Image (cartoon, coloured by chain):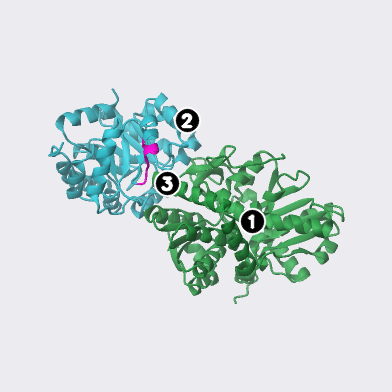
Chain colours: A cyan, B green
């Protein structure tokens, strides 16, 4: 059983959602990423989403754009990101790690090579923001063949045909983009989101994570009632941006993620 | 090549093109594609577009025989397709009118655009006002500084100009920001992309709105010379004016099609914007095409004297035409373009855009090696009034 399946199975028994924080690899420093990953887990993260920086992150809002720019400015490369995952895996064998990024840097490495190296490093899933199922058949097959889950996005605008395709091609979980917008924006219509996610959880044979627009513990608690996982990105990345050293960054993670974790870890009241 | 019919239903030109965008935009692209197909098949839409191109844009524009410069070069006869004479001074208006009419047909009240040199922004602002729509143009901070007169033009026309401060603060970042806006306001907003790039159906749609350039040029050339041209030359940034000229000639195998990229300070310096000449295939801004990228797949900053060519990608159809050998792609440096700029000013009394000057530079280079009964059509894609500050500054003159 993959680490992701094991995590979702375990959380289902506890009747609660997973907390998946997002950080950009190489931000706020090159040395911070691995300690931050461990700090995330110690503070209650169930899985980690690690952003692979790209020069043109067209689906990201200002916080993650700036984090990518800073990371690239420090010389972050895809191989370094994979090396950090490998290092994290030396002392953590159970927490799933999901990479999130854009297609071009992966193609520059070669999709087959990337899939192989990601699996070797201990990556569990990959989200490629600008690769929809229409164009992603070959890529998802390569990832699956290496034992890495290709995780697709669904949006409020996705129709029934799209949901069927994602059910066929995707694995691990499905990432539901909770709003029409970019990362870091705010969502106010949570009842509608949760209703849609409820439908998707029935239609897809996969867990559904909700991301985009979750910025605080209250919202996280609310979303956790109706989703299999809660992804928190920009709000964390913004706080990390202000950290002057790695210790400060680790402390930010502890304060912020512990609060989110206690909100998410409450068993679901509904269902 | 008798029946070239691309893209396929998924927007592919061979391995290029397609749709590489965030999931949220896919339904909007489907809706756009369907609306566009319906509009294209609707005689009323076509008649209105035709009438707007005549009455508002000023088409058809001439295919002008540049006799003095042809004589001076002592080879092929050079004909200029005078897109510079269109309303707003460049070919960009052809596409802006088409997309704005489509936006109106789709009931979208708000239009957004990205712009580099500002020509597409001005064209979009113009048609937005003409059809009574709200207009927001994204422009890189760096381009805003070097093209301040176009920024003022857009504001005069009632558009809002949003400065983009991310990345390299140029056209590619303006495109990213416009895509972000579109994802956020996808219900009421129409994104008028200014070149033959972006996700399907944009490359095909923008080409179709610009093919009037080649359709006119082909008929005018037959009328003026009694035969097809030997060579068609156009500058290539994203490649909209070039595809507009080339497309109607694709099945005419005797006609050489040459796209001229921005060679900047020279291809060996890395300071240029010539992805077809030096780049490799990758994925950016919703399509697969040739890109300027580093070995890690990060998009490289570009350089060109002309803001309109300063883009690290190129339309996917050009990538395909290059691979199958139907079109050739070369580069002209800043210096070569400047020289051609001055030459046209002094010989023909026409001030060309710096973008178009790249095409002129290549035409002037190959004409002497051709016979005097041969013909080169150069797409004079825009007028150079917007560039006089740039050119003057290079000569130490501050206007």
Q: Residues within 10 Å of mark 2 (few under 14, many from 20)?
A: few
Q: Position of residue B42 (x, y in %)?
A: 57, 54
Q: Which residue is more in the foreground, B87 or B31?
A: B31
Q: Position of residue B9 (x, y in %)?
A: 54, 40
* Dot 3 and dot 1 within a common chain: yes
Residue B56 in the figure: left or right of residue B133: right
Q: Which residue is mark 3?
A: B27
| Marks 3, 1: nearer the viewer | 3
Pointer 3 with pointer 2, Cβ within 8 A: no
Residue A159 highlighted magenta (yes or no): yes
Q: Which residue is mark 1?
A: B241
Q: CA distance from mark 1 to mark 2?
A: 34 Å
Please tell me whether mark 2 sits on a helix, a strand or a loop.
Answer: helix
Tell me if I can see residue A129 in this picture: yes
Tell me if I can see residue B92 in this picture: no
Residue A194 in the figure: left or right of residue B80: left
Q: Which residue is mark 2?
A: A138
Using the image, name the chain to which the residue with label 1 belongs. Answer: B
Q: Which residues are magenta?
A: A157-163
| Marks 3, 2: nearer the viewer | 3
Q: Residues within 10 Å of mark 3 (few under 14, many from 20)?
A: some
- Quadrant containing the N terminus of chain B is top right
Q: CA distance from mark 3 to mark 2?
A: 22 Å
Q: Residues within 10 Å of mark 1 (few under 14, many from 20)?
A: many
Q: Which residue is more in the foreground, B302 or B237?
A: B237
Q: Position of residue B69 (x, y in %)?
A: 80, 64
Q: Is residue A160 above or below residue B136?
A: above
């Amino acid at each position: 059983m993959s680490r992701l399946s094991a995590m979702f199975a375990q959380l289902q028994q506890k009747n609660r959602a997973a907390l998946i924080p997002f950080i950009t690899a190489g931000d706020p420093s090159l040395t911070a990423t691995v300690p931050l990953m461990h700090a995330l887990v110690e503070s209650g993260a169930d899985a980690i989403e690690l952003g692979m920086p790209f020069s043109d992150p067209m689906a990201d809002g200002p916080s993650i754009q700036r984090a990518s720019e800073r990371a690239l400015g420090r010389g972050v490369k895809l191989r370094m990101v994979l090396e950090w995952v490998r290092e994290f895996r030396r002392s953590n064998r159970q927490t799933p790690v999901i990479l999130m990024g854009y297609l071009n840097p992966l193609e520059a490495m070669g999709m087959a090579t990337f899939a192989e190296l990601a699996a070797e490093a201990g990556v569990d899933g990959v989200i490629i923001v600008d690769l929809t199922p229409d164009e992603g058949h070959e890529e998802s097959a390569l990832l699956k063949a290496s034992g890495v889950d290709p995780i697709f996005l669904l949006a409020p605008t996705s129709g029934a045909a799209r949901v069927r395709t994602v059910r066929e091609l995707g694995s691990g979980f499905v990432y539901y983009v909770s709003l029409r917008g970019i990362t870091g924006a705010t969502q106010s219509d949570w009842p509608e989101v949760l209703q849609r996610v409820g439908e998707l959880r029935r239609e897809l044979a996969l867990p559904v994570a909700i991301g985009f627009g979750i910025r605080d513990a209250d919202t996280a608690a609310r979303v956790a009632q109706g989703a299999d996982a809660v992804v928190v990105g920009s709000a964390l990345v913004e706080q990390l941006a202000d950290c002057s050293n790695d210790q400060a960054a680790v402390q930010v993670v502890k304060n912020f993620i512990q609060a989110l974790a206690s909100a998410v870890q409450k068993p679901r009241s509904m269902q | 090549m008798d029946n070239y019919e691309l893209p396929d239903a998924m927007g592919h030109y061979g391995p290029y093109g397609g749709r590489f965008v965030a999931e949220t935009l896919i339904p909007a692209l489907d809706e756009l594609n369907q609306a566009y197909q319906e509009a294209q098949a609707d005689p009323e839409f076509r008649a209105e577009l035709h009438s707007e191109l005549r009455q508002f844009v000023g088409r058809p524009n001439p295919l002008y025989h540049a006799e003095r410069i042809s004589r001076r070069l002592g080879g092929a006869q050079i004909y200029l397709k005078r897109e510079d004479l269109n309303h707003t001074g460049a070919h960009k208006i052809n596409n802006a009118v088409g997309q704005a009419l489509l936006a109106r047909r789709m009931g979208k009240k708000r239009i957004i655009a990205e712009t580099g040199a500002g020509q597409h922004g001005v064209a979009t602002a113009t048609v937005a006002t003409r059809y009574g729509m709200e207009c927001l143009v994204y422009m890189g901070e760096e381009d805003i500084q070097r093209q301040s007169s176009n920024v003022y033009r857009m504001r005069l026309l009632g558009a809002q100009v949003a400065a983009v401060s991310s990345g390299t603060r140029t056209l590619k970042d303006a495109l990213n920001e416009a895509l972000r806006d579109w994802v956020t306001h996808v219900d009421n907003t129409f994104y008028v992309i200014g070149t033959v790039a972006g996700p399907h159906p944009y490359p095909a749609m923008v080409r179709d709105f610009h093919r009037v350039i080649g359709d006119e040029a082909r008929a005018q050339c037959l009328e003026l010379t009694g035969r097809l041209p030997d060579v068609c030359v156009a500058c290539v940034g994203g490649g909209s004016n070039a595809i507009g000229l080339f497309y109607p000639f694709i099945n005419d195998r005797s006609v050489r099609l040459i796209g001229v990229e921005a060679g900047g300070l020279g291809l060996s310096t890395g300071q240029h914007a010539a992805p077809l000449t030096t780049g490799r295939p990758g994925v950016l801004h919703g399509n697969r095409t040739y890109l300027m990228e580093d070995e890690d797949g990060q998009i490289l900053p570009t350089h060109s004297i002309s803001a309109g060519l300063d883009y690290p990608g190129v339309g996917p159809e050009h990538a395909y035409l290059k691979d199958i050998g139907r079109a050739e792609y070369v580069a002209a440096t800043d210096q070569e373009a400047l020289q051609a700029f001055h030459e046209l000013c002094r010989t023909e009394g026409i001030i060309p855009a710096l973008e178009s000057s790249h095409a002129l530079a290549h035409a002037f280079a190959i004409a002497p090696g051709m016979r005097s009964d041969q013909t080169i059509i150069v797409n004079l894609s825009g007028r150079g009034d917007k560039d006089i500050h740039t050119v003057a500054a290079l000569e130490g003159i501050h206007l």
